[in-house]
Image (spheres, coloured by chain):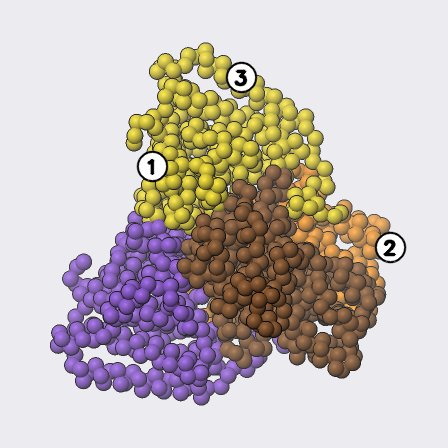
Chain colours: A orange, B brown, C yellow, D purple
Amino acid sequence: MSTVTETAAPPAKAPKAPTVTILSALNKALTDAFEADPKVIALGEDLADKEGGGIAGVTRGLSTRFGTQRVRSTPIAEQAIMGAAIGASLAGYKPIAEIMLMNFTTVAMDMIVNHAAKLRFMSGGQTSVPIVIRTMTGLGFGSGGQHCDYLEAWFAHTPGIKVVAPSTPEDAYGLLRSAIEDPDPVLVIENLPTYFASVPGTLPDTNYRVPLGKAAIQREGTDITVVSYSRLAGEARAAAASAAERGISVEVIDLRTIAPWDRETVLTSAAKTGRVLIVHEAVRQFGVGAEIAATISEELFGQLKKPVKRLGGAFSPVPYSKTLENAYAPDAARILDAILQLAS
Amino acid sequence: MSTVTETAAPPAKAPKAPTVTILSALNKALTDAFEADPKVIALGEDLADKEGGGIAGVTRGLSTRFGTQRVRSTPIAEQAIMGAAIGASLAGYKPIAEIMLMNFTTVAMDMIVNHAAKLRFMSGGQTSVPIVIRTMTGLGFGSGGQHCDYLEAWFAHTPGIKVVAPSTPEDAYGLLRSAIEDPDPVLVIENLPTYFASVPGTLPDTNYRVPLGKAAIQREGTDITVVSYSRLAGEARAAAASAAERGISVEVIDLRTIAPWDRETVLTSAAKTGRVLIVHEAVRQFGVGAEIAATISEELFGQLKKPVKRLGGAFSPVPYSKTLENAYAPDAARILDAILQLAS
Amino acid sequence: MQTSFQPDATKLLDIYRRVALLHANDERARKVILSGKIAMVYYSYRGQEIIPAAMSAALRDDDQICTIYRGIHDMLAKGFPLDTLWAELAGKSTGSCKGKGGPMHLTYPEKGIMVTTGIVGSSMPIANGLGWAAQLDGSDRVAVATFGDGASNIGAFHESLNMAAVWKLPVIFLCQNNRFAEHTTYEAATSARQIADRALGYSIPGVRVDGNDPVAMYAVAAEAVARARAGEGPTLIEAMTFRFMGHNFGDDDSYIPKEEKKAAIEADPVPIFRAKLIADGIATETELAAIEAEIESQIDAAVQFALDSPVPDTNELRKDVFAEEIAA
Amino acid sequence: MQTSFQPDATKLLDIYRRVALLHANDERARKVILSGKIAMVYYSYRGQEIIPAAMSAALRDDDQICTIYRGIHDMLAKGFPLDTLWAELAGKSTGSCKGKGGPMHLTYPEKGIMVTTGIVGSSMPIANGLGWAAQLDGSDRVAVATFGDGASNIGAFHESLNMAAVWKLPVIFLCQNNRFAEHTTYEAATSARQIADRALGYSIPGVRVDGNDPVAMYAVAAEAVARARAGEGPTLIEAMTFRFMGHNFGDDDSYIPKEEKKAAIEADPVPIFRAKLIADGIATETELAAIEAEIESQIDAAVQFALDSPVPDTNELRKDVFAEEIAA
Ligand SMILES: Cc1ncc(C[n+]2csc(CCOP(=O)(O)OP(=O)(O)O)c2C)c(N)n1
Ligand SMILES: Cc1ncc(C[n+]2csc(CCOP(=O)(O)OP(=O)(O)O)c2C)c(N)n1
Ligand SMILES: [Mg+2]
Ligand SMILES: [Mg+2]
């Protein structure tokens, strides 16, 4: 598939205006990490090339290049997948475990939460679990109620594990490389609908990193701060562009790391604009936005011009019917509406 | 054990000043529910009397009285336990599934979140899952990192399941009865350290109910609102009493139902006092308190005298050493400190 | 195998009616998707029709099933009405789930179609609960959990079979072994020589059967149902078969060895079954053609009904989350 | 069973040293709790000493284990130092886990004691990862996962044995079948005639052995280790035993049939093993008494060390959550 040939071909030689995708960036990040460190290994369902190199092709080419001992397809057994990753990490490896879809983490929560996130602490620092858990989610394909949940708040609430969610190819590369090198468990949330979107540019080189815990100001602005991550960071950028046409200057912050989140960048921007909108696809109630809104409201008490607003997914399972699926999550239009309200 | 004889004996005949415990209240609620509705059934590890009637004795007497077909001890298999409860509920029963400790929900999250919480919606209302999940947690016994987590925020973030957490015998009885009668899944969080505390009083009679979604103002006050639930509601009451001695009038709200939480009661009190403290044992970051603080700050923007404060468990797994365990969660003293700061 | 479980001519014709329906509906579903008239995630069961047709022929309407994303064959065989099925696939308000569930969560309790799950393995724990309810009701109805070969490696399989065995639940665990789990072969993921071997670990009967042979499949299914009705507990059935169209619609099945696929398709159980019915004088070409024509027109009507039906109103997002509608 | 796996006199004495240590430490632990000097949740393994003693005698220091809340016997047998063990039990900063882990999470990687879990079944998936790492390292070291009879019914057991079998991992699954899971009997929860039967479902060897017989237990353990080292994959061992003190400290074990308990205690494997060593002329009463006295004084010192050690500073709550300390 095109992303793979892209990855194979050095950007320099790439045919005319080169484009990249999040998928090709993830694939190159994995390839470069395997190159750089023989302790990096990977496992997951259908991960090796004989099984297609991952259902979306993120790991395509890895097993052919690095062997099926380092890149292993597994049975359908998420507890066993996570356990194998944890155990190998205790023995000095840096496993990258793929849980195909985020909803399937629900069968592996014990391994992730009771073990991966806690072993360093419970052992008094004698052991550690430097694993990466790659998982994917995202509505838009009519897969219904069990295939596109957004559970990041569960993990952000769990001491001992970090959570990242890239929205651009550069960040996908840089965050994944940093996650692999991090000494602790990191959950990398990939968004299916944004995998394939080609954007102009070339893939980062092997030294490129995005530090964990640092947000990106993707657009500077003075009137309103919009905080988001993953696919909706893109929708926020689009909404900000339309707002600009209406003379409203929006600062768009992509958290990139959800836990630990970048308080400093967010609070600085919020203090500057005094108007904050937080947007995610996850259910609004008890979602990631609640922690950020509560913190901003506490830290900037009396300094805000408007109450912090939150947009999130509907309070329901993800519906099947396209009509309902389209209505489920905020999009650029709904973000723009909220921006206009905040600006008024 | 005393709680059981208590339950058996009618309050009237009870020896002199009668006392009750949360444990005896839960036991009577279950007994009365089994009496009232033949469709009520229960399952869990060591639940039946042959296996001790539950590790803490909450279900003691049930299997002897109602038979081991309705009250079943199970293998150690939480997915199977939840699946059996879900399936039986689809066929018209009202199962009460016990997940012995809250940390063990991590092996059953798929059944709870992808199925119990979603089947009504995904079936377009053709089926429903009127189950109760009873689970227990609570630090204080040196059981360490895997036996006393507070995961209520995960479930509150999940559309399709309700979450309650009683802090008094009356509420334990009334909430459990309401949960059993509710047409949808309800997670009942019991707190181990408070099971056995005897308080004066008699057990509610079989008609007593506490509606889901209604908080309790356990102490009226005018200066500061403290919002809490479960064990720390008791600590909050104690802190409020000490504050009163210092001339500070604290209103103590016990949420009782965490999801859906009682916005009206909380916002009314917050509007009255203008100073709010939210307290729970769960990790503060991305915890239940975040949603409540964010909502109050948004709804009462400009009307608060102080920023909403949150106290929660430390950002770490629950530690073993008594010294550390004592330092982990807020207690009456730390709540009082926070009250004094807010009052200043 | 007792001969009493051998299907007679009437039963075989009954099974064929179901097979013909399943076969025609799958062919149609893929045509409709290609036509662009209805977009959906679709997991073709083409090649596996005999298994649910024979299984359902041994069941009553009040028997219940829990099936999976690849389960439309199980559901049609059990009696899921075509119109509301197609309307659900199209995400219309007239769908059995009002368009909220879709292909992976089709539900129709009237015919005992209680749960369709998209989570591998999760049909089994829930089927146990249906079986427990049957015990409590004092009814001899049974529950069937269908799942694939790959699902036999996940924890829920083990917990479910153990609990069903200890509680002697009237549950039939029907594994449709099509030799692949997504792109993974049976051998690459499954350590058992045959999945039926796992029954020993639960002290229950485990039977491997040619799921493409209607007579053998029916006999095994009927015997398992009889045991369950008699209170003798669960049975694990491993029905051998093959999926002709890959894992899901659009799957380039390059990972399937060419010869393996060729051989399987040459052994397509549907035409073979059809020919045998005629050869054995159980039905004439004309009779079967009539059945098939009837089915085609029923499907025509159902697809049209789906296309003509309205989409759900967005306030449906606030309904069926709980019994009580959520305030706007 | 090949005779090459029979323990010789030296090996038997080695096993007895471990047994005596385990036995004495359990007796002491319960005394110390009763004395009120140290409060802890405690799951006595009294009666199960032979199993880990024999297992460990077949292991090297670089072999690794994942054990459970009822695992202090496994750990002492594998070489967990007494002083840091007792300090951890006392929740002191000198404990192996700085007092953060406690009895259910004891860890000592230097001796291959990698994980102690309080979650039933969860020792197994992690042991697979240790085995995978050994494969990657090209090392012949092995991993052992210990667990109970009740744990053989949870999903993690099944997923782990299947993966280990498919990947031919050097992992030994050591089930200590003490016939109870908390208050639940084997029969009430476990459908397999014997847990070893479940090995067939993974095409691996499954052996039931008298875990109270040091010779038989060693032979089975040594053979499983040899297979794992040779790259022949995992073994499931079901070691039959009994826990004398109930599930945990304070458990009134009224649910255990009196005769069953009486018979088990009369067959206490420790004095029997001891007597046999003397009867077979492998050791004299004096030699064994000397070993036991030595152990008692080591335990005296360890308990004293624990009592004299300081409690952890509360800022430890911010350490070891991540590699980087969390800001106050
Ligand atoms: C717990 C879980 N893990 C992974 C998946 C993704 N997935 C969907 S179908 C499938 C393959 C299942 O194979 P099998 O059980 O043989 O059934 P078949 O599709 O062949 O009918 C996988 C891995 C899932 N749905 N649930
Ligand atoms: C997933 C999970 N469910 C329940 C428990 C509670 N629990 C702790 S020990 C135990 C019994 C385990 O019995 P067995 O596996 O036979 O081991 P034994 O205690 O007999 O050594 C149970 C149910 C748990 N720790 N983890
Ligand atoms: Mg398959
Ligand atoms: Mg046991």
Q: Is residue C59 above or below residue A7?
A: above
The one of B72 and A242 positioned closer to us in this rendering? B72
Q: Which mark is residue C294?
A: 3
Instruction: Give, as a three-letter code, the residue at label 3.
Output: Glu
Closest to the camera, between mark 2 and mark 1, is 1
Classify the position of the C terminus of chain D by image quarter.
bottom right
Q: Is residue A321 left or right of residue A161?
A: right
Give the distance between the C-alpha atoms of the residues marked 3 and 1, in whole angstroms: 34 Å
Q: Is residue A315 above or below residue D257?
A: above
Q: Can you tell which quarter of the image residue A162 is in?
A: bottom right
Which chain does the numbered disc 3 sit on?
A: C
| Label 3 or label 1, whichever comes before in sequence order | 1
For label 2, the residue is: A344
Q: Can you tell which quarter of the image residue B328 is in?
A: bottom right
The one of C201 and A271 positioned closer to us in this rendering? C201
* Helix, strand or loop at mark 3: helix
For label 1, the residue is: C208
Q: Is residue A306 visible?
A: yes
* Helix, strand or loop at mark 2: loop
Instruction: Give, as a three-letter code, the residue at label 1.
Output: Arg
